[in-house]
C-alpha cells in the first residue's frame, strides 16, 4: 500500500488515528503523540505557522470541553481522564473527530463577508 504525503498537521493526526499508530510502546501514547506533533509543527513552522495555530486551538477546545482552567496540555488532560493506553487513543480519536466536526460546523455557519 502506497502512502500519501502528509501536507498538514490535520492530515497527520487523521492518518495516525486511522492507522492506529499513536504513541510508542511502553510510553503513554497521547503524551508521546503530543511531543511528536509539536516536533512536526516546529519543523514546519517557517512555512506553515498554521500548524501551531491548529494545536493551540485544539488545546483551548479541550480545556473548554473538560472545563479545565489549569495550564496542562490537551495530552495531559486526556492522559489524566483515561484509564488505559487503549482508552487514551480512543478518547483522542473521539475528541479529535468531535472537534473537527464542530470546527466544520462553525466554518459553515459563519456569515459570508465579501
Image (cartoon, rainbow, N blue to C red):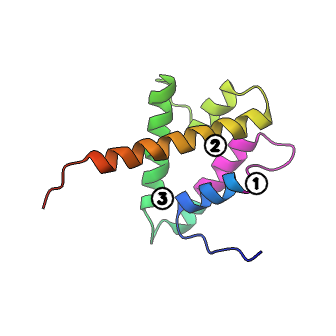
Q: Give the residue drawn at x 54%, y 70%.
A: 7
Residue range of the region highlighted in magenta in the rendering: 19-39
Q: CA distance from mark 1 to mark 3?
A: 20 Å
Q: CA distance from mark 2 to mark 3?
A: 18 Å
Question: Observer-nearest residue: 112 or 13?
Answer: 112
Left or right, 5 with respect to 111, comes to right
- Mark 3: secondary structure: helix
The percent position of residue 81, horizontal first and vertical second, equals: 66, 25
* Residues at marks 1 and 3 touching, judged by CB atoms closer than 8 Å: no
Q: Position of residue 19 (x, y in %)?
A: 73, 57
Image coordinates of residue 15 in percent, x first then y, are 65, 59
For marks 1 and 3, the one nearer the N-term is 1
Q: Is residue 18 left or right of residue 56?
A: right
Residue 21: which numbered mark, if any? 1
> Percent x, y for residue 27?
81, 42
Residue displayed at 57% across by 37% down: 74
Q: Between residues 105 and 99, which one lies in front from this camera angle?
A: 105
57 falls in the magenta region:
no
Give the structural element (helix, strand or loop) at label 2.
helix
Marks 2,3: beta carbons within 8 A: no
- Residue under numbered circle 2: 93
Q: Is residue 91 above or below residue 83?
A: below
Classify 10 Å Cα crowding around label 1: few (below 14), some (14-19), many (20 and above). Answer: few
**Label 2 packing within 10 angstroms: few (<14), some (14-19), many (20+):** some
Nearer-N-terminus badge (1/2): 1
Q: Considering the numbered disc 1 on the image, is that residue within a helix, a strand or a loop?
A: loop
Tell me the crowding category of disc 3: few under 14, some 14 to 19, or many 20 or more residues within 10 angstroms, Cα based: many
* Residue marked by disc 3: 51
Please identify the residue farthest to the bottom as the structure is shown.
Answer: 2
For residue 2, side relative to residue 102 (left or right): right
Question: What residue is drawn where x is 54% and y is 60%?
Answer: 9
100 is higher (above) or lower (below) than 79: below
Amino acid at each position: 500500500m502506497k502512502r500519501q504525503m502528509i501536507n498538514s498537521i490535520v492530515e497527520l493526526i487523521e492518518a495516525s488515528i486511522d492507522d492506529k499508530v499513536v504513541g510508542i510502546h511502553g510510553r503513554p501514547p497521547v503524551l508521546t503523540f503530543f511531543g511528536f506533533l509539536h516536533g512536526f509543527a516546529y519543523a514546519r513552522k517557517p512555512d506553515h505557522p498554521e500548524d501551531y495555530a491548529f494545536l493551540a486551538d485544539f488545546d483551548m477546545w479541550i480545556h473548554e470541553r473538560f472545563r479545565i482552567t489549569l495550564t496542562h496540555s490537551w495530552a495531559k488532560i486526556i492522559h489524566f481522564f483515561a484509564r488505559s493506553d487503549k482508552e487514551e487513543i480512543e478518547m483522542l480519536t473521539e475528541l479529535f473527530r468531535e472537534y473537527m466536526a464542530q470546527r466544520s460546523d462553525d466554518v459553515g455557519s459563519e456569515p459570508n463577508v465579501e
